[in-house]
Amino acid sequence: MTASRPASPMGPTTAGMAMMIAAMLMAPGLDTIAKLLMERLSPAEAGMGRFLAQTLVLLPIVIVSGRMSRPSGLHALAGGFLGMALLCLNTGLRGMPVANALAIFFVEPLALTLLGAFVLGERVGVRRLSAIGVGLVGVLIVLRPNIAAYGLSAAWPLVAAVLFACYMLTSRILARRGERLVLQFWTGAFATIILAGALAFGVAAGPAPGLLLVPTLYEFALFAGAGVLASITHGLIVAALGRIEAGLVAPFQYLEIFSATLLGWLVFSDFPDPVTWTGTAVIVGAGIYVFHRERLQARSGPEVPVTG
Protein backbone atom coordinates (compact mmCIF):
# COMPACT_ATOMS: atom_id res chain seq x y z
CA MET A 1 0.00 0.00 0.00
CA THR A 2 1.32 3.41 -0.92
CA ALA A 3 0.85 6.26 1.53
CA SER A 4 -1.03 9.18 0.11
CA ARG A 5 0.85 12.42 -0.34
CA PRO A 6 -0.15 15.43 1.70
CA ALA A 7 -1.73 18.23 -0.28
CA SER A 8 0.66 20.90 -1.46
CA PRO A 9 0.54 23.96 0.81
CA MET A 10 1.08 26.22 -2.21
CA GLY A 11 -1.84 25.70 -4.57
CA PRO A 12 -2.60 27.93 -7.57
CA THR A 13 -4.71 30.39 -5.57
CA THR A 14 -2.15 30.69 -2.77
CA ALA A 15 0.71 31.07 -5.25
CA GLY A 16 -1.23 33.72 -7.17
CA MET A 17 -1.86 35.68 -3.99
CA ALA A 18 1.81 35.51 -3.01
CA MET A 19 2.80 36.82 -6.46
CA MET A 20 0.34 39.72 -6.17
CA ILE A 21 1.64 40.64 -2.71
CA ALA A 22 5.23 40.74 -3.98
CA ALA A 23 4.25 42.75 -7.08
CA MET A 24 2.23 45.29 -5.13
CA LEU A 25 5.01 45.90 -2.62
CA MET A 26 7.47 46.54 -5.48
CA ALA A 27 5.18 48.61 -7.72
CA PRO A 28 5.54 51.95 -5.84
CA GLY A 29 9.24 51.83 -6.68
CA LEU A 30 8.20 52.56 -10.27
CA ASP A 31 6.13 55.55 -9.17
CA THR A 32 9.04 56.84 -7.09
CA ILE A 33 11.37 56.57 -10.09
CA ALA A 34 8.77 58.34 -12.26
CA LYS A 35 8.50 61.21 -9.78
CA LEU A 36 12.29 61.58 -9.78
CA LEU A 37 12.36 61.61 -13.58
CA MET A 38 9.58 64.20 -13.75
CA GLU A 39 11.69 66.72 -11.90
CA ARG A 40 12.86 67.58 -15.43
CA LEU A 41 11.05 65.37 -17.95
CA SER A 42 7.37 65.38 -18.91
CA PRO A 43 4.98 62.63 -17.71
CA ALA A 44 4.80 61.17 -21.23
CA GLU A 45 8.58 60.97 -21.67
CA ALA A 46 9.02 59.45 -18.20
CA GLY A 47 6.44 56.79 -19.04
CA MET A 48 7.72 56.17 -22.56
CA GLY A 49 11.28 55.69 -21.33
CA ARG A 50 10.16 53.21 -18.71
CA PHE A 51 8.20 51.07 -21.18
CA LEU A 52 10.95 51.27 -23.78
CA ALA A 53 13.48 50.04 -21.22
CA GLN A 54 11.10 47.27 -20.15
CA THR A 55 10.62 46.18 -23.77
CA LEU A 56 14.38 46.12 -24.38
CA VAL A 57 14.90 44.03 -21.23
CA LEU A 58 12.30 41.48 -22.35
CA LEU A 59 13.25 41.32 -26.04
CA PRO A 60 16.26 38.95 -25.72
CA ILE A 61 14.37 36.82 -23.18
CA VAL A 62 11.43 36.39 -25.56
CA ILE A 63 13.72 35.60 -28.51
CA VAL A 64 15.80 33.03 -26.59
CA SER A 65 12.67 31.38 -25.21
CA GLY A 66 11.37 30.86 -28.74
CA ARG A 67 7.96 32.22 -27.77
CA MET A 68 7.95 35.30 -29.99
CA SER A 69 4.67 35.55 -31.87
CA ARG A 70 2.73 38.18 -33.74
CA PRO A 71 0.67 40.49 -31.54
CA SER A 72 -3.10 40.32 -31.48
CA GLY A 73 -5.64 43.08 -31.17
CA LEU A 74 -5.95 42.30 -27.47
CA HIS A 75 -2.22 42.93 -27.01
CA ALA A 76 -2.62 46.35 -28.61
CA LEU A 77 -5.70 47.05 -26.47
CA ALA A 78 -3.90 46.04 -23.26
CA GLY A 79 -0.89 48.18 -24.19
CA GLY A 80 -3.14 51.13 -24.95
CA PHE A 81 -4.91 50.86 -21.61
CA LEU A 82 -1.61 50.50 -19.75
CA GLY A 83 0.12 53.38 -21.53
CA MET A 84 -2.73 55.82 -20.99
CA ALA A 85 -3.14 54.72 -17.37
CA LEU A 86 0.52 55.47 -16.68
CA LEU A 87 0.31 58.82 -18.46
CA CYS A 88 -2.62 59.87 -16.26
CA LEU A 89 -0.98 58.58 -13.08
CA ASN A 90 2.32 60.30 -13.89
CA THR A 91 0.50 63.58 -14.50
CA GLY A 92 -1.06 63.28 -11.05
CA LEU A 93 2.23 62.30 -9.42
CA ARG A 94 3.87 65.53 -10.59
CA GLY A 95 1.61 67.55 -8.33
CA MET A 96 1.13 65.39 -5.25
CA PRO A 97 2.93 62.88 -3.00
CA VAL A 98 3.17 59.27 -4.18
CA ALA A 99 1.15 57.89 -1.26
CA ASN A 100 -1.70 60.36 -1.78
CA ALA A 101 -1.87 59.68 -5.52
CA LEU A 102 -1.96 55.93 -4.92
CA ALA A 103 -4.65 56.32 -2.26
CA ILE A 104 -6.89 57.96 -4.87
CA PHE A 105 -5.84 55.36 -7.45
CA PHE A 106 -7.12 52.62 -5.15
CA VAL A 107 -10.65 52.96 -6.49
CA GLU A 108 -9.25 50.69 -9.23
CA PRO A 109 -9.84 47.40 -7.38
CA LEU A 110 -13.55 48.16 -7.13
CA ALA A 111 -13.69 48.81 -10.88
CA LEU A 112 -11.71 45.61 -11.52
CA THR A 113 -14.00 43.54 -9.32
CA LEU A 114 -17.10 44.84 -11.08
CA LEU A 115 -15.57 44.37 -14.54
CA GLY A 116 -14.52 40.83 -13.62
CA ALA A 117 -18.07 40.02 -12.54
CA PHE A 118 -19.87 41.58 -15.51
CA VAL A 119 -17.40 40.85 -18.33
CA LEU A 120 -15.87 37.51 -17.27
CA GLY A 121 -18.73 36.24 -15.13
CA GLU A 122 -16.48 35.80 -12.09
CA ARG A 123 -18.15 35.20 -8.74
CA VAL A 124 -17.74 37.93 -6.15
CA GLY A 125 -18.49 36.64 -2.67
CA VAL A 126 -19.97 38.68 0.15
CA ARG A 127 -16.87 38.27 2.30
CA ARG A 128 -14.62 39.38 -0.55
CA LEU A 129 -16.67 42.50 -1.15
CA SER A 130 -16.70 43.21 2.57
CA ALA A 131 -12.91 42.94 2.76
CA ILE A 132 -12.55 45.28 -0.23
CA GLY A 133 -14.82 47.75 1.54
CA VAL A 134 -12.73 47.56 4.70
CA GLY A 135 -9.62 48.14 2.61
CA LEU A 136 -11.19 51.24 1.10
CA VAL A 137 -11.91 52.54 4.59
CA GLY A 138 -8.20 52.23 5.26
CA VAL A 139 -7.45 54.13 2.05
CA LEU A 140 -9.76 56.94 3.14
CA ILE A 141 -8.00 57.09 6.50
CA VAL A 142 -4.68 57.48 4.68
CA LEU A 143 -6.00 60.00 2.18
CA ARG A 144 -7.85 62.20 4.69
CA PRO A 145 -10.14 65.00 3.45
CA ASN A 146 -7.41 66.95 1.67
CA ILE A 147 -7.99 66.21 -2.02
CA ALA A 148 -8.87 69.87 -2.53
CA ALA A 149 -5.30 70.79 -1.63
CA TYR A 150 -4.00 69.26 -4.87
CA GLY A 151 -6.52 70.66 -7.34
CA LEU A 152 -6.86 68.91 -10.70
CA SER A 153 -3.85 66.71 -9.95
CA ALA A 154 -6.15 64.57 -7.80
CA ALA A 155 -8.42 63.79 -10.76
CA TRP A 156 -5.72 62.12 -12.85
CA PRO A 157 -5.26 59.08 -10.56
CA LEU A 158 -9.03 58.49 -10.76
CA VAL A 159 -8.87 58.31 -14.56
CA ALA A 160 -5.76 56.14 -14.31
CA ALA A 161 -7.59 53.75 -11.99
CA VAL A 162 -10.35 53.04 -14.51
CA LEU A 163 -7.86 52.59 -17.37
CA PHE A 164 -5.65 50.28 -15.30
CA ALA A 165 -8.67 48.16 -14.35
CA CYS A 166 -9.36 47.73 -18.07
CA TYR A 167 -5.72 46.73 -18.59
CA MET A 168 -5.89 44.18 -15.76
CA LEU A 169 -9.05 42.66 -17.19
CA THR A 170 -7.58 42.42 -20.69
CA SER A 171 -4.43 40.86 -19.22
CA ARG A 172 -6.61 38.36 -17.40
CA ILE A 173 -8.11 37.23 -20.71
CA LEU A 174 -4.69 36.94 -22.37
CA ALA A 175 -3.12 35.22 -19.35
CA ARG A 176 -5.71 32.45 -19.62
CA ARG A 177 -4.22 31.61 -23.01
CA GLY A 178 -0.79 31.06 -21.47
CA GLU A 179 0.76 34.05 -23.26
CA ARG A 180 2.36 35.60 -20.19
CA LEU A 181 5.84 36.44 -21.48
CA VAL A 182 4.52 37.51 -24.87
CA LEU A 183 1.84 39.56 -23.12
CA GLN A 184 4.44 41.47 -21.14
CA PHE A 185 6.55 42.16 -24.20
CA TRP A 186 3.80 43.34 -26.53
CA THR A 187 1.89 45.40 -23.98
CA GLY A 188 5.12 47.20 -23.12
CA ALA A 189 5.84 47.77 -26.81
CA PHE A 190 2.36 49.13 -27.54
CA ALA A 191 2.43 51.28 -24.39
CA THR A 192 5.71 52.77 -25.64
CA ILE A 193 4.07 53.64 -28.96
CA ILE A 194 1.04 55.18 -27.24
CA LEU A 195 3.19 57.37 -25.01
CA ALA A 196 5.45 58.34 -27.90
CA GLY A 197 2.33 59.58 -29.66
CA ALA A 198 1.22 61.45 -26.56
CA LEU A 199 4.63 63.08 -26.32
CA ALA A 200 4.66 64.00 -30.01
CA PHE A 201 1.28 65.70 -29.82
CA GLY A 202 2.04 67.50 -26.59
CA VAL A 203 -0.66 65.73 -24.56
CA ALA A 204 1.47 65.52 -21.42
CA ALA A 205 1.89 68.69 -19.37
CA GLY A 206 5.53 69.20 -18.51
CA PRO A 207 8.40 71.66 -18.54
CA ALA A 208 8.46 71.40 -22.32
CA PRO A 209 5.18 69.88 -23.59
CA GLY A 210 5.60 67.83 -26.73
CA LEU A 211 9.38 68.20 -26.69
CA LEU A 212 11.60 65.13 -26.28
CA LEU A 213 14.43 66.08 -23.94
CA VAL A 214 17.71 64.15 -24.02
CA PRO A 215 18.03 62.26 -20.72
CA THR A 216 21.11 62.73 -18.57
CA LEU A 217 23.24 59.77 -17.46
CA TYR A 218 21.40 59.85 -14.14
CA GLU A 219 18.04 59.70 -15.93
CA PHE A 220 19.26 56.88 -18.18
CA ALA A 221 20.17 54.93 -15.05
CA LEU A 222 16.70 55.56 -13.62
CA PHE A 223 15.12 54.37 -16.88
CA ALA A 224 17.22 51.19 -16.82
CA GLY A 225 16.23 50.47 -13.23
CA ALA A 226 12.59 51.12 -14.05
CA GLY A 227 12.78 48.72 -17.01
CA VAL A 228 14.09 45.87 -14.89
CA LEU A 229 11.71 46.55 -12.00
CA ALA A 230 8.72 46.90 -14.34
CA SER A 231 9.56 43.59 -16.04
CA ILE A 232 9.63 41.79 -12.70
CA THR A 233 6.54 43.51 -11.30
CA HIS A 234 4.35 43.08 -14.36
CA GLY A 235 5.59 39.50 -14.79
CA LEU A 236 4.37 38.70 -11.30
CA ILE A 237 1.02 40.40 -11.94
CA VAL A 238 0.41 38.54 -15.19
CA ALA A 239 1.44 35.22 -13.62
CA ALA A 240 -0.90 35.89 -10.69
CA LEU A 241 -3.80 36.72 -13.00
CA GLY A 242 -3.33 33.33 -14.64
CA ARG A 243 -3.96 31.64 -11.28
CA ILE A 244 -6.64 33.68 -9.52
CA GLU A 245 -9.78 35.59 -10.44
CA ALA A 246 -9.52 39.30 -11.20
CA GLY A 247 -11.77 40.24 -8.29
CA LEU A 248 -9.64 38.31 -5.79
CA VAL A 249 -6.53 40.44 -6.39
CA ALA A 250 -8.29 43.65 -5.38
CA PRO A 251 -7.57 43.73 -1.62
CA PHE A 252 -3.88 42.98 -2.17
CA GLN A 253 -3.44 46.00 -4.41
CA TYR A 254 -3.94 48.14 -1.31
CA LEU A 255 -0.55 46.91 -0.07
CA GLU A 256 1.07 49.43 -2.41
CA ILE A 257 0.35 52.13 0.15
CA PHE A 258 2.77 50.53 2.60
CA SER A 259 5.86 50.70 0.39
CA ALA A 260 4.66 54.00 -1.13
CA THR A 261 4.69 55.71 2.25
CA LEU A 262 8.05 54.14 3.10
CA LEU A 263 9.64 55.29 -0.17
CA GLY A 264 8.11 58.73 0.22
CA TRP A 265 9.86 59.01 3.57
CA LEU A 266 13.22 57.67 2.35
CA VAL A 267 13.39 59.52 -0.98
CA PHE A 268 11.31 62.67 -0.52
CA SER A 269 11.48 63.10 3.30
CA ASP A 270 7.70 62.68 3.46
CA PHE A 271 7.43 60.95 6.84
CA PRO A 272 4.19 58.97 7.29
CA ASP A 273 2.12 60.24 10.19
CA PRO A 274 0.25 58.02 12.69
CA VAL A 275 -2.97 58.32 10.69
CA THR A 276 -1.20 56.92 7.62
CA TRP A 277 0.10 53.96 9.59
CA THR A 278 -3.37 53.35 11.04
CA GLY A 279 -4.87 53.26 7.57
CA THR A 280 -2.08 51.00 6.35
CA ALA A 281 -2.81 48.55 9.20
CA VAL A 282 -6.48 48.43 8.19
CA ILE A 283 -5.55 47.83 4.54
CA VAL A 284 -3.07 45.06 5.29
CA GLY A 285 -5.53 43.47 7.72
CA ALA A 286 -8.20 43.34 5.02
CA GLY A 287 -5.80 41.67 2.60
CA ILE A 288 -4.70 39.08 5.15
CA TYR A 289 -8.34 38.31 5.94
CA VAL A 290 -9.14 37.67 2.27
CA PHE A 291 -6.04 35.48 1.97
CA HIS A 292 -7.29 33.42 4.94
CA ARG A 293 -10.87 33.22 3.64
CA GLU A 294 -9.80 32.03 0.19
CA ARG A 295 -7.65 29.25 1.65
CA LEU A 296 -10.66 28.07 3.68
CA GLN A 297 -12.86 28.37 0.60
CA ALA A 298 -10.49 26.20 -1.44
CA ARG A 299 -10.99 23.41 1.12
CA SER A 300 -14.71 23.72 1.81
CA GLY A 301 -16.32 25.11 -1.34
CA PRO A 302 -17.24 28.45 -2.93
CA GLU A 303 -18.60 31.47 -1.18
CA VAL A 304 -22.17 32.55 -1.73
CA PRO A 305 -21.88 34.77 -4.81
CA VAL A 306 -23.40 38.20 -5.08
CA THR A 307 -25.90 38.19 -7.91
CA GLY A 308 -28.01 40.89 -9.36
Image: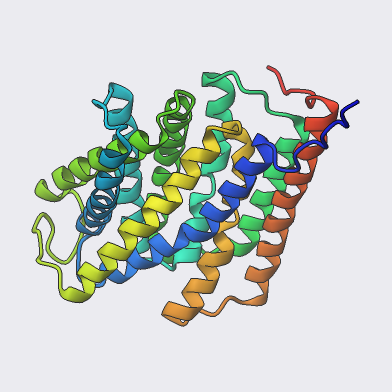
Q: Which residue is drawn at the image coordinates 60% and 56% (left, top)?
A: 255
| 151 vs 242, nearest the viewer | 242
Residue 228 in picture, x, y percent from top left: 35, 58
128 relative position to 35: left or right: right
Quarter residue 187 falls in: top left
**Residue 280 visible in the snapshot:** yes
Residue 94 in picture, x, y percent from top left: 32, 65
Q: Is residue 95 above or below residue 242?
A: below
Residue reaching furthest to the right: 1
Quarter residue 7 falls in: top right
Residue reaching furthest to the front: 1
Quarter residue 144 falls in: bottom right
Residue 283 in picture, x, y percent from top left: 67, 56
Q: Which residue is drawn at the image coordinates 52% and 27% (left, top)?
A: 115
Residue 11 in picture, x, y percent from top left: 69, 37
186 relative position to 110: left or right: left
Q: Is residue 23 above or below residue 218?
A: above
**Residue 147 visible in the snapshot:** no
* The C terminus - image quarter: top right
Count of all numbered marks drawn on residues in the image: 0
* The N terminus - image quarter: top right
| 43 vs 33, nearest the viewer | 33
**Colouring scheme, one of rainbow, by chain, secondary structure, one colour:** rainbow
228 relative position to 286: left or right: left
Q: Which residue is drawn at the image coordinates 79% and 27% (left, top)?
A: 303
